[in-house]
Image: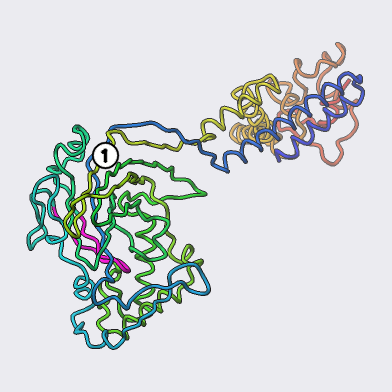
Amino acid sequence: MWCFALATAARWRLRALAHAPPSTWLRIGAVLALIAYALFECFRLRRLYDRELVSTGFHEEPVGPPPLLSVCVPAWGGRLLGLRPVPSADDSTQWPLLLEREDDWRRLNVSAGLTPLWLATVPPVHQLVVSCNGQRCAPGEDGASPLGVWTTQLGFDVVCFTLRPNGSLDYDSVLDVSYGQRGPLLHLQLPPELPWATLKLHFGPLADLGGPQSQDDAPHSFRLEAGRWHRVVAEETETQRLQLWRRPCQPTPADSRGLCVERCVGRLSSAAAGCRLPWTLAAREVPECSNFAALRRALWAVKALDWRALEHRCRCLDPCLERRVALHGRHGRWKGAPAGRLLVQLRRQDRASISTEQLVMGLEETAAAACGMISLLLGVSAVAALDWLIDLGRRIVTVTCGQTDSKEKEVDAADRHGRPHLRRGWPAGAEAATSDRPSGHQGLPRRATVGALSEAERQEPAAALAQKRPPRSAGTARVAGPARVPETLDILVHRG
């Protein structure tokens, strides 16, 4: 109904504009062109909002608690000497494995799992780490030490010993003094078959060490060689990402993308091989591989995975808050060093670099830009345009619904007052012609309404006036009264 009323109003407007001068049409064309351009700009702003453009800001803050410190040594120095990775022909990763001494593997007693086999290839941590910052830091049986707690983590071809400082190991204490005045931070003793080790600083658990899936997320490391001194500087960075529709992130700060991929690969390979590899962090409910055949089967299960499809299968996201430590420094020869000894002097910078993402075109910025564009092109504010639309809607509702409501009220009132001539189907002027008449002249029209009667006709009696009128035809109404004079509504309404 309202569409019909709107179309009728538009048709009358167009008829009025048909005879308008050319200047009016020019103004209308200019307004329509500006409206079209404003709509185009609003569409362009919507596209920019959907793209979720971000800007990155950088600032520095004081560093927080110290990171974890890990010393990783290669696990092929002893019984794993035949377990070495070789380049594959189909890709650049170090898969599959070349197992040279299968007989030695079969003779090993690995019924309890392969973890003791990995640990047997490296010295224990109390033999590896001599002192920390001039103090004894070797752990006991439970891994606790005066400076923190040591834990062990297996890798693909390495074993890592991680120290979680409890506050006594202050990295900044080395920063306040010159090198050599308080002694090295770490004093390591490597066996002859292990000529080097790796130093890592990180804030979360290490991902699968040595596997191809952890290369992108591996923490920065510094190579330590026996018979040398090393001066290492640690620079901390923090990245704060936004949660976007086009690029969601992992809200858990301790779960990095590398750990997520490692757990996913562990679940898939364990399900395919029936046992899990020693370094797998996930699928702890699956028993560990306990023999050489199971180990080979699990390794080939990892090899058979489609690494390009892991992004879709694992659905691993970058963390919303990522903290990393970059290591750089220099080393030199330690004259008179005992066999296998090395020194590490670590310096931690006192401020961390923070990068924060911010939306360029958020919802508020997009709405403000659209309102400003409309105001600039059309000369009206967005609030005024909204008020005009609301007023137009009210007028349409009034035109379509107001007349119907008024007619319903009139019919209801006629039924209540005993005036059947006001029911549906009667002309609109029937009420004015037949209501409020004197009791003795019920057949005559009301004087105030039928003003076109002559003076002589007003003074004639009702019967004479009725005789002058033509007889009542079909469709006329008889009004009850003492005189019972027939009347025709067409004559009453259109008289004169």
157 part of magenta stretch:
yes
Q: Residue at x 23, y 74 (%)?
A: 78
Give the left or right position of residue 433, taking residue 135 as reference: right
Q: Mark 1 points at which residue?
A: 348
Image quadrant where residue 285 sits: bottom left
Compared to residue 209, the image places residue 334 above or below, namely above
Which of 466 and 376 lies nearest the eye of the viewer?
A: 376
The magenta stretch spans residue 440: no
**x and y, in percent, of residue 198 in the image:** 29, 56
Task: Determine which quarter of the picture holds residue 396.
Answer: top right
Q: Nearer the viewer, residue 55 or 401?
A: 55
Above or below for 90 versus 428: below
Residue range in magenta is 149-162
Q: Where is residue 241 in the image (x, y as percent from the top left)?
A: 42, 43
Residue closest to the eye, 444 or 183:
183
Name the quadrant of the N terminus: top right
Query: In the image, is residue 222 above or below residue 458?
Result: below
Give the image location of residue 302, x and y in percent: 40, 74
- Compared with residue 66, is residue 144 higher up or lower down, i.e. above or below? below
Q: Is residue 93 left or right of 27 when viewed as pictured?
A: left
Helix, strand or loop for the magenta stretch, by majority: strand
Amino acid type, mark 1? Arg
Mark 1 neighbour density, 10 Å: few (under 14) some (14–19) many (20 or more):
many
In the current view of this chain or complex, which residue is farthest to the front? 336
Looking at the rendered structure, the secondary structure element under dot 1 is: strand
